[in-house]
C-alpha cells in the first residue's frame, strides 16, 4: 500500500524527497544542457534524450502513486491556493487515462486513449533541438534546485513548512510536464541493440518453453486485465 505522505514524519518526508531530487533525470538534464551548448552531433543528443526520458519514466513511477494524496491536500489547504488553478488546468486538459500515461512512457497506447500526434523520431534536427531546450528549461528543474537548497538548510519548523510547499510546487511542475509530453510519441527502446546477456536470457526462456514451460504474452496479460494495447510506432 502506498503510504500517505501527508501523514508521515518530517524526517521521513525529507528522506523521501532526497531520493526524488536525486533521480537520474536530473543528472541527464545537466548533460543535455552541456550538449546543447556545443555543436553536438544529432545522434549524441538523441542518445542523451533516451537517458533523460528513461529518467523521466522512473520519476513518474515514483510520483504518480502519490498524486491523489498531494492533490487532495492542495485542494483543501489554503497554503497551496496558488497551485489550485494550475492543477485544475492540468486536470481539464488531460486527454489520457492514468494507465494510458503509463503505457505512453513505454511506447504503447491504451485502446480508447488518444494517440500522441508528434513522433519524436520524425522531428527535424532543429525541431528536436527546440524540444530539448523546452524540456531542460522546464520549471520542474528550477523547483528541484530550490528543494535541494532547502534540504541543505538547518532543519526548523519554518524550513519544514517551506519544504512541503516547495515539494507541492515541484509536484505540480511534474504534472505539467506529463501533460506536455502527452502529445509526444516516443519509445525509448526503439532501435536499441539487444545486449548479449539479454539474448542469453531469451535462449534460456526459449528452452524453458520447449521443455513444456508456460509463459504469458503481453496480449494475454492485457486480456486478463481487460486492457486493449496497441503499438504507437
Image (cartoon, rainbow, N blue to C red):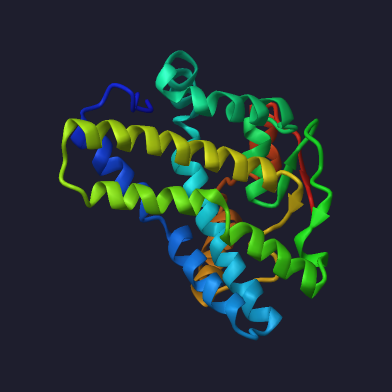
* Residue at 30% over, 41% down: 16
Q: Is residue 146 above or below residue 122?
A: above
* Residue at 60% over, 25% down: 85
Q: In this view, does 216 lie to the left or right of 145?
A: right
At which x and y percent is residue 94?
A: 71, 32
Q: In this view, does 47 lie to the left or right of 159?
A: right
Residue lying at the far top of the rendered structure: 76
Q: In this view, does 154 lie to the left or right of 41?
A: left
At which x and y percent is residue 100?
A: 68, 36
Q: In which quarter of the image is the C terminus?
A: bottom right
At which x and y percent is residue 92?
A: 71, 25
Q: How many marks?
A: 0
Q: Quadrant of the N terminus?
A: top left
Residue 189 shows in the view: no
Q: In this view, does 193 lie above or below 213?
A: below
At which x and y percent is residue 195?
A: 54, 74
Amino acid at each position: 500500500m502506498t503510504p500517505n505522505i501527508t501523514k508521515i514524519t518530517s524526517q521521513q518526508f525529507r528522506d523521501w524527497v532526497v531520493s526524488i531530487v536525486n533521480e537520474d533525470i536530473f543528472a541527464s538534464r545537466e548533460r543535455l544542457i552541456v550538449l546543447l551548448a556545443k555543436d553536438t552531433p544529432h545522434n549524441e543528443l538523441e542518445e542523451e534524450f533516451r537517458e533523460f526520458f528513461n529518467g523521466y519514466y522512473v520519476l513518474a513511477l515514483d510520483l504518480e502513486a502519490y498524486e491523489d494524496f498531494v492533490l487532495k491536500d492542495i485542494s483543501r489547504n489554503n497554503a497551496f491556493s496558488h497551485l489550485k488553478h494550475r492543477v485544475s488546468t492540468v486536470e481539464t486538459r488531460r486527454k489520457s487515462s492514468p494507465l494510458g500515461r503509463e503505457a505512453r512512457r513505454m511506447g504503447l497506447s491504451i485502446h480508447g486513449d488518444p494517440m500522441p500526434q508528434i513522433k519524436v523520431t520524425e522531428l527535424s534536427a532543429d525541431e528536436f533541438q527546440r524540444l530539448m531546450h523546452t524540456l531542460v528549461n522546464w520549471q520542474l528543474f528550477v523547483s528541484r534546485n530550490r528543494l535541494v537548497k532547502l534540504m541543505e538548510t538547518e532543519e526548523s519548523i519554518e524550513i519544514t513548512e517551506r519544504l512541503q510547499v516547495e515539494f507541492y510546487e515541484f509536484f505540480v511542475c511534474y504534472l505539467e510536464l506529463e501533460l506536455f509530453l502527452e502529445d509526444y510519441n516516443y519509445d525509448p527502446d526503439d532501435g536499441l541493440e539487444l545486449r548479449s546477456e539479454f539474448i542469453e536470457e531469451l535462449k534460456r526462456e526459449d528452452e524453458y518453453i520447449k521443455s513444456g514451460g508456460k509463459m504469458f504474452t503481453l496480449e494475454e496479460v492485457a486480456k486478463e486485465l481487460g486492457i486493449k494495447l496497441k503499438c504507437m510506432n
